[in-house]
Amino acid sequence: MNDIKKLLGKRIKELRKAQGISQQQLAEVANIDQRSLSHIECGDTFPSRSLLDLAKALNIELKDLFDFEHLDVTIETMSAYIKENIDHLPKESIIAVYRMVKALR
């Protein structure tokens, strides 16, 4: 349960930031206390009563709150994904990826 709380908190924070709204703004729209939202985003509490309100306030479906597979990806998974998909990218994108990797080394 702890992992789900942490992942859900990360996902809510990610969605909130993607929409450019503050914790206070989301808390007001979702009709919950800002401190409660902070605890939810930190993964300290599970927002069972607030889930529908949070989804509505973020203008998303409830199921989208639980789309956090990308938040818990290992380095091995990322590396495999890049290797599997690099050949399917257009030439310009491959060049961009090459330059980024080269710059990071």
Image: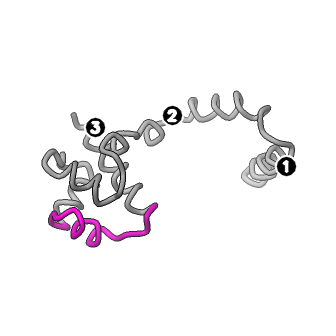
Does 59 appear in magenta? no
Who's the residue at 84% across and 49% down the image?
Answer: 92
The structure residue drawn at horizontal position 56% and vertical position 30%, both measured from the top left corner, is 77
Question: In the rendered image, which residue does mark 3 sit on?
Answer: 4
Q: Is residue 85 left or right of residue 61?
A: right
Which one is closest to the eye, mark 2 or mark 1?
A: 1
* Comparing labels 3 and 2, the label whose residue is closer to the camera: 3
Q: Position of residue 4 (x, y in %)?
A: 28, 37
Type of amino acid under label 2:
Thr
The x, y position of residue 61, in whole percent, is 34, 46
* Front residue (pair 54, 33): 54
Give residue 17's position: percent from left, percent from top. 42, 63
Q: Which residues are magenta?
A: 18-34
Secondary structure found at label 1? helix
Task: Compute the Cα span from label 2 to label 1.
Answer: 27 Å
The label number, if any, that marks residue 74 in the structure image: 2
Whether residue 31 is in magenta: the answer is: yes
- Residue corresponding to mark 1: 92
The reply to whether discs 3 and 1 touch (Cβ–Cβ < 8 Å) is: no
Whichever of labels 3 and 1 marks the residue nearer the N terminus, that label is 3
Q: CA distance from mark 3 to mark 2?
A: 17 Å
Looking at the rendered structure, which numbered label has been put on residue 105?
Answer: none
Task: Decide if residue 31 is on the left or right side of residue 21.
Answer: left
Q: Residue at x 13, y 48 (%)?
A: 49
**Image quadrant where residue 14 sits:** bottom left
Q: Is 28 in front, or is 37?
A: 28
Q: Is residue 83 left or right of residue 22?
A: right
Q: Secondary structure at mark 3?
A: helix
Instruction: Residue 9 in the image: state x and y as whole percent.
Output: 30, 50
- Which quadrant, please, contains the N terminus? top left
